[in-house]
């Protein structure tokens, strides 16, 4: 063992459990350097010992870090944990700056980037340095595919303030917080440019914090905003759409109207008309009957399933049926009569005119304003029967509004039309309506609904969205200055090919509805650069208590 005198701001240590050759512990001004074997032996019999040794920016420019050695329960560090710039389960007290598009809180703290590199070079043996760098490369992006450049305002600026910078504001993501709150967090993962942490305690709560209605809110990944008042949720959704148009769309805020307040209804719980709980393959131990551990939804920041007996955002009718369905599945697992006894599955509960349906292949009906829609229970259809009528009304009225030049809008094209929600709803206000959808089954449902409601001026095409502008039929003869195109793409947004064809087609108006405002903002940049201007932007709170936003942006040809 080597003993070195050090000041209060000198280098501290490397956390125990990283599999390193040397361990450095600072006690009463001395740095004690142990070999792995002697270190483990020295602390083997110390009860409740847990080191919290980590790197942090010191008040001295030349220092590397200060160490903290506290008592606590033993914590096992995951083998793939990257120990820079924070140790596993290091606790920090931070202030929440803002939220990402996924509802995660963004905190920032000073770190000495150069000190971490110096510590790695001087203390770690070569083999450990190589392994550490491999871990850092593997952890450069989240496994869930999050794009932090889109989620986190100024993330790149915060962590890349110049090639010669030795310190920066390191970003730490933490769930279940509100901007402005003072919180205690616990680090559990370090990425290349930011870290993930769990919320330990809210030291100074926001006045907008409320008690979540669901007892599983802190662990279940279904909801992100139950700890916020509904007014705060909607204000953040409005602000996020505004920020994305400016930052991702790179649009000057002076060139388009400010995003309108989020549109929603008073039904903020028990509104969802469809849920899809999951369960893993049944477990079977020797001498015991097979059993299912949990039926519910994925845990926050994990693929584990949380057992959910009642869902607070699902309709009351769905929750009543959920009790019966869970009992049925548990019984079938014990008896070995599940349809796929060796695998997990996803359940369906759809609340429709026929009641709560659990068979995805059963046809159901539901009303949106004056239209009665018929579709398979397992197929996509918007799941908030309270907000959807308002959303449809806004889309149709925005498409029909007489433009400045004074000619009425007479032709309606619905791209990515699904089961025809917008196309069929607009039929009574337009001369001709055409919908296009790649899903053949959805097209058949749209045609059935048109026949069911005796709507004669709607045509549906089963093809990719790009195909509608390539066709010599359908829409080629439409007067461009009297045509509105509704775009409602999947989360990934429109393809570059579709956007180019749309701009070449040059309709008077583009009505863009999106379930992902970040990809919508990306596509807005293309439309604006091709002769369109934004005339309005309106978010819809289709899923209260969650981070999800439906965003409606109207583009007019200049």
Image (tube, rainbow, N blue to C red):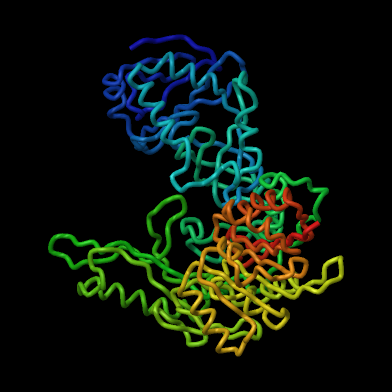
Quadrant of the image occupied by residue 279: bottom left
User: Where does the image place residue 538, in percent across and percent down from the top left?
Assistant: 72, 62
User: Where does the image place residue 385, in percent across and percent down from the top left?
Assistant: 59, 77
Most foreground residue, 391 or 453: 453
Q: Residue at x 55, y 63 (%)?
A: 467
Q: Is residue 265 left or right of residue 306?
A: right
Q: Residue at x 73, y 48 (%)?
A: 529
Quadrant of the image occupied by residue 547: bottom right
Of the 4 image quadrants, the one containing the C terminus is: bottom right
User: Where does the image place residue 254, in percent across and percent down from the top left?
Assistant: 83, 48
Of the 4 image quadrants, the one containing the N terminus is: top left
Quadrant of the image occupied by residue 537: bottom right
Most foreground residue, 446 or 119: 446
Q: Is residue 519 above or below residue 338?
A: above
Q: Looking at this view, name the residue that lies furthest to the front.
A: 472
Q: Residue at x 23, y 61 (%)?
A: 283
Q: Is residue 161 above or below residue 172?
A: above
Q: Is residue 407 left or right of residue 86?
A: right
């Amino acid at each position: 063992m080597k003993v070195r005198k050090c000041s209060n701001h000198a280098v501290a240590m490397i956390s125990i459990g990283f599999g390193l050759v040397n361990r450095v512990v600072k006690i009463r001004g001395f740095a004690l350097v142990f070999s792995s074997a002697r270190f483990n032996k020295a602390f083997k019999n110390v009860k409740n010992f847990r080191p919290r040794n980590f790197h942090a920016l010191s008040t001295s420019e030349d220092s590397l870090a200060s160490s903290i050695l506290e008592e606590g329960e033993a914590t096992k560090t995951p083998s793939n944990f990257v120990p820079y710039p924070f140790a596993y389960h290091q606790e920090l007290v931070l202030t929440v700056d803002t939220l990402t598009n996924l509802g995660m809180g963004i905190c920032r703290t000073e770190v000495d980037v150069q000190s971490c590199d110096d510590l790695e070079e001087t203390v770690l043996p070569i083999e450990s340095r190589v392994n550490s760098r491999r871990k850092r490369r593997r952890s450069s992006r989240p496994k869930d595919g999050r794009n932090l450049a889109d989620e986190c305002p100024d993330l790149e600026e915060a962590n890349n303030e110049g090639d010669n910078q030795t310190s920066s504001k390191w970003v730490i993501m933490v769930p279940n917080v509100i901007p402005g709150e003072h919180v205690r967090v616990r680090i559990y993962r370090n990425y290349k440019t930011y870290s993930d942490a769990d919320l330990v305690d809210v030291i100074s709560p926001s006045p907008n914090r409320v008690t979540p209605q669901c007892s599983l809110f802190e662990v279940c990944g279904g909801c992100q905003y139950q700890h916020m008042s509904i007014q705060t949720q909607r204000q953040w959704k409005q602000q996020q759409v505004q920020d994305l148009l400016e930052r991702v769309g790179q649009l000057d805020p002076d060139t388009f109207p400010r995003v309108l307040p989020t549109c929603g209804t008073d039904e903020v719980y028990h509104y969802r008309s469809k849920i899809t709980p999951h369960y893993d393959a049944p477990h079977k131990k020797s001498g015991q009957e097979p059993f299912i551990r949990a039926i519910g939804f994925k845990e926050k920041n994990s693929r584990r399933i949380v057992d959910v007996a009642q869902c607070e955002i699902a309709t009351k009718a769905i929750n009543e049926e959920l009790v019966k369905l869970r009992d049925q599945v548990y019984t079938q697992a014990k008896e070995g009569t599940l349809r796929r006894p060796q695998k997990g599955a996803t359940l369906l509960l759809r609340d429709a005119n026929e009641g709560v349906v659990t068979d995805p292949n059963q046809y159901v009906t539901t009303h949106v304003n004056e239209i009665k829609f018929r579709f398979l229970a397992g197929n996509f259809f918007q799941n908030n029967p309270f907000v959807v009528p308002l959303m449809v009304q806004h889309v149709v009225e925005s498409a029909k509004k007489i433009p400045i030049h004074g000619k009425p809008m007479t032709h309606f094209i619905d791209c990515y039309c699904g089961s025809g929600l917008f196309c069929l709803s607009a039929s009574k206000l337009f001369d001709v309506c055409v919908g296009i959808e790649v899903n053949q089954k959805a097209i058949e449902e749209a045609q059935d609904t048109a026949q069911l409601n005796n709507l004669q001026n709607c045509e549906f095409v089963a093809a990719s969205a790009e195909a509608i502008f390539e066709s010599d039929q359908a829409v080629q003869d439409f007067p461009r200055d009297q045509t509105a195109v509704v775009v409602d793409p999947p989360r990934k947004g429109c393809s570059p090919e579709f956007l180019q064809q749309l701009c070449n087609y040059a309709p008077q108006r583009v009505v863009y509805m999106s379930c992902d405002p970040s990809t919508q903002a990306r596509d807005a940049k293309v439309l604006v650069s091709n002769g369109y201007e934004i005339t309005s932007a309106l978010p819809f709170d289709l899923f209260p208590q969650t981070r999800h936003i439906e965003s409606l942006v109207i583009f007019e040809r200049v």
